[in-house]
Amino acid sequence: MSRSLVPIALPDGRSYDIRIGAGLLGESASWQGLPRAAAALIVSNTTVAPLYAERLRAQLLAHYLRVDVVVLPDGEQHKDWASLNTIIDHLLGQALDRKTVLFALGGGVIGDMTGFAAAIYMRGVPFVQVPTTLLAQVDSSVGGKTAINHPLGKNMLGAFYQPERVIADLDTLDTLPDRELRAGLAEIIKYGPIADVGFLCWLEDNLHALLERDKTVLGYAVQRSCEIKAEVVAADEREQGLRAILNFGHTLGHAIEAGLGYGAWLHGEAVACGMLLAADLSQRQGLLNEQAVLRLRTLIERAGLPVQPPRLGAERYLQLMRVDKKAEAGAIRFVLIEGLGQAGLHAVPDELIVATLEAHGAA
């Protein structure tokens, strides 16, 4: 398959490229032109490190005098202060200076924590995203959001901090479990209803090939997802308005993750269910017709993703959603679909949320 490059256009010389293609991890060109330093640090986890850390380290040793590796436990439940401190402890313990380049080798959890560590270590050191999951390649590695979780809310502690580059090697998806692949599809599906109805049609036609891991089809899905996100991030880097649409499905999705305990559902699974309930709310608000809601439900089900939210109870859902970052003055705000291909942020009354939760057996 052909390679593709998606630029992220940002002011003040902070623009960078997303490089997409098979075999990028082992190519020296992928790592050329990055900030110069004496040392680099690869941050990975117990699942990904045995597969790819030494391959990446071998490439980086051509550019840095020393390349260390920190391996963290795997899972959303470890996206916390303890794991973040493990990274910081290594940086300080090895006296690594402020030019040290961090490389996030893994999925969204590793990318978010490594980026956050880079943002706060010595008030900011450079980092590079090397996403190895579909979800990270199409969403979390792009745009500069970094964070850790708190027991009371997901991604509540973090910073906007952009990487120097994103290397999305499609070959790393070969070792991705099927459940993780489907979870990544949720973040791809998201882009159709909020921004590109043509892409939604393409996903409906090519979903089977995506599930079969056809590299050409996967490559286009990653590229188009990144193009849409790049346009939004360039227009609203710090989520003052437009960028909020990228959180379609996340308000309820984050509540599911926090309510069940981080790691019980994968992020993409929770987002998929959250998208369906947000579509239901869109219909109740008179923004979307029933046929469009059914169309989205069918696609989510075909992707093997959940459409039935867990029964946490209406009060628990409301409590969790009130600490969502989009909430204002206690009012819960959802990204709603204003006709397929267009979305906006809306304050939704509690009674409407409860009605949707009850209709889906979650109250």
Image (cartoon, grey):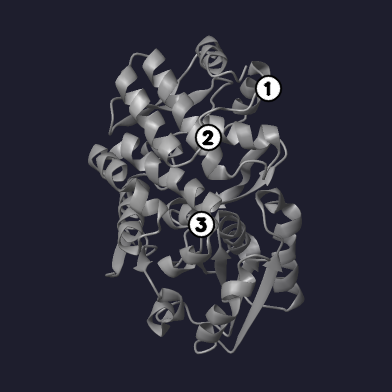
First in sequence: mark 1 vs mark 3:
3
- Residue 265 is situated, as x and y percent measured from the top left of the image, at 62, 41
First in sequence: mark 2 vs mark 1:
2
Q: Real-space Cα distance between discs 2 and 1?
A: 20 Å
Disc sitting over residue 306 in the figure? 2
Determine whether 346 is above or below 208 in the image. above
Disc 3 packing (10 Å; few <14; some 14–19; many ≥20):
many
Q: Real-space Cα distance between discs 1 and 3?
A: 32 Å
Q: Nearer the viewer, mark 1 or mark 3?
A: 1
- Residue 9 is situated, as x and y percent measured from the top left of the image, at 32, 58
Residue at 72% over, 58% down: 83
Q: Would you say 111 lies left or right of 29 here? A: right
Residue at 30% over, 38% down: 195
Q: Would you say 224 lies left or right of 345 here? A: left
Disc 1 packing (10 Å; few <14; some 14–19; many ≥20):
some
The single residue placed furthest to the left in the displayed view is 198
Residue 190 visible in the displayed image = yes
| The image quarter in which residue 239 lies | top left
Q: Are marks 3 and 2 in contact (CB under 8 Å)?
A: no
Under mark 3, the amino acid is Tyr
First in sequence: mark 3 vs mark 2:
3
Q: Nearer the viewer, mark 3 or mark 2?
A: 2
Describe the element under mark 3 as helix, strand or loop: loop
The residue tagged 3 is 161
| The image quarter in which residue 57 lies | bottom right
The residue tagged 1 is 316
Disc 2 packing (10 Å; few <14; some 14–19; many ≥20):
many
Q: Real-space Cα distance between discs 3 and 2?
A: 32 Å
Determine whether 294 is above or below 241 in the image. above
